[in-house]
Amino acid sequence: MKRKTEPLTGLLKYEHRTIVAMTEIYCRNHHKGEERVNKLCTDCREFVDFAEFRLVKCPYGQVKPACQNCPIHCYKKDMKEKARIIMRYSGPRMLVWHPVMAVKHLMHAKRPLPPLPKKKRVKKIEDEKSANRIEATEV
């Protein structure tokens, strides 16, 4: 399930690296017998790809809050549960495997919530002449 996405930059890229590191720890200890590509089984790779896609589409952009504090729920229900399981397992182990990343992640979770971004809406402007033509043909 590979989706085309824009390349991540700045804080979003670091957030993605954190998700990948946590998923690698989880996958290494829970999916031992499965075939892996880049340290992840296909199920975990699907989760990481989904997380990357959601990060790209995040309306907050570079001021994104930690997902646990975010008022916008953009993950599917099953993926949200999988993220919770992975982070619950990997969180304490991140201090051993990636201590700097773990501390940065904890500090990021303590940041205040930024204001909600304004919705991007496209206004539809109807052309009166084309509307009149349609009405004329229907009569």
Image (tube, rainbow, N blue to C red):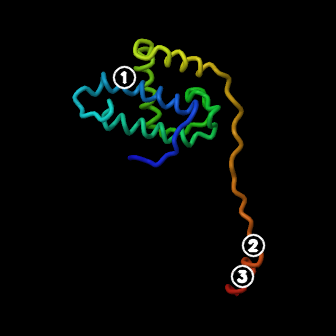
Mark nearer the N terminus (3 vs 1): 1
The residue at which mark 1 appears reads as 25
Which residue is rendered at x = 67% and y = 27% of the image? 113
Determine whether label 3 and label 2 are within 8 Å by CB.
no
Determine whether label 2 and label 1 are within 8 Å by CB.
no
In 3D space, how far apart are the residues under numbered discs 3 and 1 (Cα atoms)?
63 Å
Q: Which label sits in the foreground, 3 or 2?
A: 2
Category of crowding for the residue at label 3, using alpha-carbon neighbours closer than 10 angstroms: few (below 14), some (14–19), many (at least 20): few
Q: Secondary structure at mark 1?
A: helix
Q: Which label sits in the foreground, 3 or 1?
A: 1
Q: Tell which of 29 and 7 is nearer to you.
A: 7
Which residue is rendered at x = 60% and y = 27% of the image? 69
Q: Residue furthest left?
A: 33
Residue type of the residue flagged with mark 2? Asp
Determine whether label 3 and label 1 are within 8 Å by CB.
no
Number of numbered callouts drawn: 3
In 3D space, how far apart are the residues under numbered discs 3 and 2 (Cα atoms)?
13 Å
Q: Residue furthest right?
A: 128
Q: What is the x, y in percent for residue 30? A: 30, 24
The residue at which mark 3 appears reads as 135
Residue type of the residue flagged with mark 1? Ile
Mark nearer the N terminus (2 vs 1): 1
The residue at which mark 2 appears reads as 127
Mark nearer the N terminus (3 vs 2): 2
Q: Tell which of 25 and 73 is nearer to you.
A: 25
Tag shown at residue 123: none
In 3D space, how far apart are the residues under numbered discs 2 and 1 (Cα atoms)?
57 Å
Residue type of the residue flagged with mark 3? Glu
Q: Secondary structure at mark 2?
A: loop
Q: Residue furthest top?
A: 96
Q: Secondary structure at mark 3?
A: helix
Which residue is rendered at x = 44% and y = 14% of the image? 92
